[in-house]
Amino acid sequence: MKRTLGVCYYPEHWPEEMWADDARRMVETGLSWVRIGEFAWQRMEPSRGTFDWGWLDRAVETLGSADLKIIMGTPTATPPRWLVDEMPDMLPVDADGRVRKFGSRRHYDFSHQGYRKECQRIVRLMGERYGANPHIAAWQIDNEYDCHDTALSYSDAALTGFRDWLAQRYQSTDAMNRAWGNVFWSMDYDHFDQIELPNLTVTEPNPAHVLAFRRYSSDQVVAFNKVQADELRKHTDAPLIHNYMGRVTTFDHWAVGKDLDIASWDSYPIGFLSDRIEGTPEEKQYFLRQGHPDNQAFHHDLYRAVGKGRMWVMEQQPGPVNWAPYNPAPLPGMARLWAWEAFAHGAETVCYFRWRQAPWAQEQMHAGLLRPDNENAPAQTEARQVADEIAGLANVGTADAPVALVFDYESAWAWDTQPQGADFDMFRLAFAAYRALRSLGVDIDIISPETSDLSDYNLVLAPGIIKLSEGFRSALKTYKGIALIGPRTDTKTEELSIPSPMGPNLSNTDVTAILAESIPPTDFIALENGGGFRHWFEHLDGDAAVYRKTEGGLPALMGNDHVRCLAGWPDDETFRSLLSDILKETGVETMDMPQGLRTRCTKTHRFVFNYAPESISWNGTEIPPAGVHWEEL
Amino acid sequence: MKRTLGVCYYPEHWPEEMWADDARRMVETGLSWVRIGEFAWQRMEPSRGTFDWGWLDRAVETLGSADLKIIMGTPTATPPRWLVDEMPDMLPVDADGRVRKFGSRRHYDFSHQGYRKECQRIVRLMGERYGANPHIAAWQIDNEYDCHDTALSYSDAALTGFRDWLAQRYQSTDAMNRAWGNVFWSMDYDHFDQIELPNLTVTEPNPAHVLAFRRYSSDQVVAFNKVQADELRKHTDAPLIHNYMGRVTTFDHWAVGKDLDIASWDSYPIGFLSDRIEGTPEEKQYFLRQGHPDNQAFHHDLYRAVGKGRMWVMEQQPGPVNWAPYNPAPLPGMARLWAWEAFAHGAETVCYFRWRQAPWAQEQMHAGLLRPDNENAPAQTEARQVADEIAGLANVGTADAPVALVFDYESAWAWDTQPQGADFDMFRLAFAAYRALRSLGVDIDIISPETSDLSDYNLVLAPGIIKLSEGFRSALKTYKGIALIGPRTDTKTEELSIPSPMGPNLSNTDVTAILAESIPPTDFIALENGGGFRHWFEHLDGDAAVYRKTEGGLPALMGNDHVRCLAGWPDDETFRSLLSDILKETGVETMDMPQGLRTRCTKTHRFVFNYAPESISWNGTEIPPAGVHWEEL
Amino acid sequence: MKRTLGVCYYPEHWPEEMWADDARRMVETGLSWVRIGEFAWQRMEPSRGTFDWGWLDRAVETLGSADLKIIMGTPTATPPRWLVDEMPDMLPVDADGRVRKFGSRRHYDFSHQGYRKECQRIVRLMGERYGANPHIAAWQIDNEYDCHDTALSYSDAALTGFRDWLAQRYQSTDAMNRAWGNVFWSMDYDHFDQIELPNLTVTEPNPAHVLAFRRYSSDQVVAFNKVQADELRKHTDAPLIHNYMGRVTTFDHWAVGKDLDIASWDSYPIGFLSDRIEGTPEEKQYFLRQGHPDNQAFHHDLYRAVGKGRMWVMEQQPGPVNWAPYNPAPLPGMARLWAWEAFAHGAETVCYFRWRQAPWAQEQMHAGLLRPDNENAPAQTEARQVADEIAGLANVGTADAPVALVFDYESAWAWDTQPQGADFDMFRLAFAAYRALRSLGVDIDIISPETSDLSDYNLVLAPGIIKLSEGFRSALKTYKGIALIGPRTDTKTEELSIPSPMGPNLSNTDVTAILAESIPPTDFIALENGGGFRHWFEHLDGDAAVYRKTEGGLPALMGNDHVRCLAGWPDDETFRSLLSDILKETGVETMDMPQGLRTRCTKTHRFVFNYAPESISWNGTEIPPAGVHWEEL
């Protein structure tokens, strides 16, 4: 399959007389796709039942006849003011109980049934009108679920929905009281309408209460998306897509992904570096204009799996953005590097966001491929270069990875609810494992916790998984590679309580985590022969073999030839060294990647990316800053 | 009197068939006491007027017949859901005006008269049923007043109560306006129903307004406690206890203590270290698994006085807790050391919290003497060791301390209200004085500001006391030791205004604090011959002798042979050196205690505790980390 | 004109029998002015329609007959409780939607029409009574507009007013939608009553929406002030004054100033140092007891212009204040230095705040010229010295400055709304330019952005001006000095969008800012030949000459002989060096002022002020800490 480029475009922002020229220049830039429509509800339906499809018809025709394939967005992330006037209780409510007002975007509550019906209505109308249009080659549903923390809402709609959801899940409050341990602190309920949302309690609410609300809230996102997906399926055969975000764990992307055809995501490497990635000031300065060298890769690998093999970048940062605390410009070449890295990880299409910088409103300081005055911005040239390059490198495919990393959203909710240590975070832990693997030059698949066939992988990591799934647990019994479990894996029930017997509960090795310590940043649990743990340390007990010990003589790594439990959260160097040893044991070849240099294989080529602000030599090849090198395998 | 051990137990959390075995193992562990009942309202009264006493009767019988003495807790810290449904306005309200919802504990407002009646009712029923039961050897009223910041509530109930309280205190708004200086900024009131709670004002409210609300709020805690105490007295002769917390100054413990027989407190040395004690990151890391070496001692000495000589530790940390930002495990031996230190300071009983770690709900990550899977946790062994040791060391008594430190809750409210410098805090100041004394190896009594007989003490410190009581002021006239007054002592009226003449007003020495400076962390007021002040510096004026000067030539210590005023807040080294000199003057022997080593005498023995993570040599004896050494006097 | 001293006095705070003695001591101290009345509404009108003017009549008579000139304050910053009871919706509302309650001061909403009428009523009554009184030589209207963040309120009154204001400004929502770019994110409005205040939106609101609300809010302050000014003009010929604050940019002081005769401000150098001025901990420690050496000067120069040449200091810090995080005492001599610096910058009168320290209420820890016990405080002696000195230095005048700095409130709102980098702030940028100029020993005028005649100045700086005014733009065409424009100047329309063509739009030099980067504190854009930019860097394009480049080869300074654009925000040393070069080019003599030493010329003398805590030698003269040196020109 040939890789392609695209761009996000808002015809409603510009005079109609510019559209044809825009289309022509998009094609000249080497772009194949153009996304439109996703914030234009008010322009489609200026008031209840009054429609203006004309401009959109003409935009589709203009772009399509220029040979651009269109991704049509449903505009449900921006309900118009008149709709909010009709149903003001559709607005989300924050954890402090304050209504989140109209005036920006995503001002809707996922639980609001009335709004869901409205979304179905507008999507039906769009599907009827454009579902069979040959220019519309894909659909995007809504935009960036949970952006601006909207997956969790503390509204009346959420309260009503949550009570119903609990009633369906538990059938009786007695069952729920037992499951949650409500006997503790006399928290028992007599009927479901007594239960409130778990915000503003005197001190922390029951973690099972919170986790239930997190599950409920995720289910609403899934259901909200499914309403639109089901409606669109009636009208179109084009693939359905949602554009996910980076480091968002508030809803189960695996579940949303099941109802869609392609997983896309919005990649803002420089914005994310300052906003969503831990790191020392020195590291952040080093990668200031490049982004973290593993963050994009992690999300490519994650969403490739969420998309069941089909992954896009729907929005690619082209220059400075407007929303991070500070917004420097990318190093020249990064807009090319980021696209190539996406392709190397299996992306089918990379769309730059956006075509021309808007002169007004919230994102006017967000760069595009064109400047607001219609001149080319630097990223336009880089996009053109990528377009030329992909023409010469068709059908590179995606490599089979020898290593898998389990990523689980329920676990993220569990540890958000009960971190026990202030810096325990699911994404952070998984990303630490991922970074260590990447620094060893291996390719990685990210897999769902429901995975029940591990036979393709030499090594499987399952850090911080609250409770192993039955399929995964069963697969471990006959696994021939090495599974590295922990820290904190399989130590809870699905109601976030301590199981009996205590976990992890592995059929073929005897290890139990009998005590957990969270470790402040000043402390360090040193291991014999170097390295150590930070953040988290469990006391492991049992008859299994001890592979590593702490300096204090407690087990640091226990298990058997095929399943091992890690007692703590290794620091970066220790994680790398531990995994290097295990990878050798499993026969996977590793490479010592210098800071900033990263690699990914496709079926046919090895790609090497230089995220450093300086040249790095790679097997005799000098790779400049922001450089991309590839060689045939 | 023999020291005893106990434990906190929740029979309602466990299958009834486990109770007898639990009782047996408690006795085997050497425990004499078991506290039960304090969160079980819903299990006693599942709905209005429907009671289930059977399980509690059987639990009492099972534990009692195993020879355990029972502390019965009143369950008023956890009113059941149905009660909150009946009177939703019993919920407390935070300073932002948000109702604090049901779903955890302490969801009641101290001002709510309806809830007080309900507490009296449940306590009456418990008293009638268990007041004469021979197994019930003590009662605990409620649990941890003010935990989760519940002593201050901004509810309608509080508003109504506050207005009545003001009317009773001042009789007329004119009197109140004058007392508060409401002429300033035209803040006068015409009638009491115009007065609001002092939250959410445009800028800071009148400090006299805030202080009145703090006094009112403390009075509600006292009254709330007294309702239950008075009711219980009708039914039982067993001693009444409340379990106070560490570093809580929001209500007047002296006043609550007057209505009770024993003061107990809940000692979580490692949780408090990170959460409630100032200190450098280095100090906190050094004592990470031991707790601050003076914090437990301070509270033992404080609550021994609040309990009029009778003090317990009702909850003793046994392992990692769940509620601090980070929760490491104690150094092996600390669960023993902490108990011994409590005993050395006069504790009659130390109860570990809790028997078996709960598998669910908020505290599932809080260790107990047993693990959730019913195996012994490390602290069980240490408790057993303490039980053996106390058997061999009966009747050690409590030593008479040569030094007294005044601790005053009203002053804490005053300086919270008007800190003048961001880091001025009553507890912090008193604790600085206490630390300096402890580092010199002397025993300390903490005394009430109402104390009017100082003759037992060689040295009395009264730092930061807003206004000396008449009894104390009078005692100073004939005092033969040295009283060290200040900084900031006796500089305000009881309405938190500046007295005329300006203070301190001491009858036999002429010193006036004419100007106060708060000192940012970057600054330091150096003294002649070394040392200096931080946080606070008053310009002292008057005819009294100047004992120390600043490098700038201003008085740092003034007074006479028996009463001296300290102009500032000495840093740790200066405080130690100043007190060392004064103690020598008063004939009290001092010792230079190394960091981490602390001592306390009983009538018969000197105890030495090693809080350091390494061995320390003490007069030729090597004391290991977490070691306890004792020798006869 | 002779410089004079004065003091703020509250006769209502003190027994009437003290007044005459107070007046006598004021005169003895050398004071000519006394400000009274500004918080005394409740004492003037204890209840609706019941007046007590007697005390005020007698106070005026007592003070006036002692030969003191009176500044009568209108008491509208402290409406009495009974008035709030009558119209509770006059209270302001914070951005979280919480009503800001009675109990301190400034508890009114600028938008509330009912309260405006009440203000007019009390001012009319005062005007009628005292407007012609010969002792009343000036009037102060209200007190410190925006103090405690009161210029912005999110009340219903503000909402109603804002909608009306928008309707008047835009006439149709279509026009407004186009002006704001509401097509972005479907934010269009159909009628004005749909528009809400721009708080509590899901994510940031449209910046044009916010800027409109900032303009509206500033207009309310202007209108509120004008109601009183217009009323007073009917009754008095005495000059009308408001006392502005330091670093307040929430309303347009230029606009308020147009309706008044004198601009005064309240100068608290030490409080501001910790509270409102950026700086390293080392700098703040160095100037801890002196204040920032440029902050007072900046505001003197600013308010001299706002007052159209007439400037006072209405409140001068005399000792420790009570409201900063820490409140140390000034270095001896500073109360004199601050007064002299004000005079050197053109102040007609400097009033110390306050006469005698109050013993109660919020400001009881705020020093005065007298202590609460009526003894002289240190500042009294310094005031007396200043009084003697001004007697000997009459008619020094104010020098013509060779350099002008444009300061614009609308730009401050624009960059608050859309900082793009977390530390971009209009005052900070202007103050950086000012500091650099001051460190070169030059005198500066601060000028309005509407200035259209620049011919008096050799150098004009216009940093961060959102959009140059037509008058200023036109003046540049024929300007013979050097105008230094930027960074970020003239890059937006007045609706805070990007203009077409992109700016800056200068008629005689071709420079365009095509891309903006905000720079985190860890980063630095180095220039060729040393120095560099922080915070902000624009990529400049065009045919103009390039005067300086970055190390990366991008333009850092472009333009022509008379207009130059600065691409970034120079760090202190770079700003100083850049300006030093440009000043040489323009023929203005510069001096290298040591840290802490500052100078200002009057018509007749050069004054030199030593803000350092140590002596500094100046052209052979040793100037002690807090020293003031003057020499004839």
Image (cartoon, coloured by chain):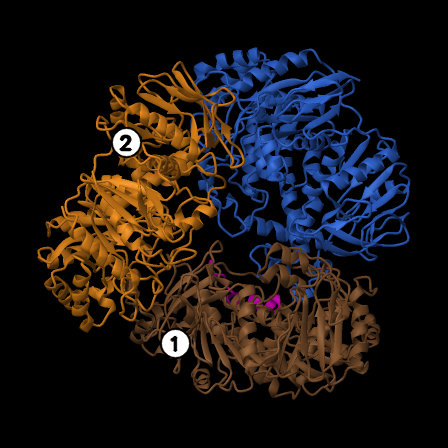
Chain colours: A orange, B blue, C brown
For badge 2, the amino acid type reads Val
- The answer to if C279 sits in the magenta stretch is no
Q: Give the residue at mark 1.
A: C544
- Is label 2 or label 1 in front? 1
Q: Nearer the viewer, residue B287 or A450?
A: B287
- Kindly identify the residue that appears in the image at 24 percent across and 19 percent down: A478
Taking C433 as reference, is C392 above or below it? below
Image quadrant in which the C terminus of chain A is located: top left
Q: Is residue C375 visible?
A: yes
Taking C439 as reference, is A198 above or below it? above
Q: Residue furthest front?
A: A620
Please provide the residue range marked out in magenta: C79-97
Question: Could you give the CA–CA distance between mark 2 and mark 1, rounded to whole angstroms?
Answer: 57 Å
For badge 1, the amino acid type reads Ala
State the image coordinates of residue B148 (x, y, percent, origin top left).
54, 40
* Chain at tag 1: C
Task: Say whether residue A479 is left or right of residue A434.
Answer: left
Q: Give the residue at mark 2.
A: A403
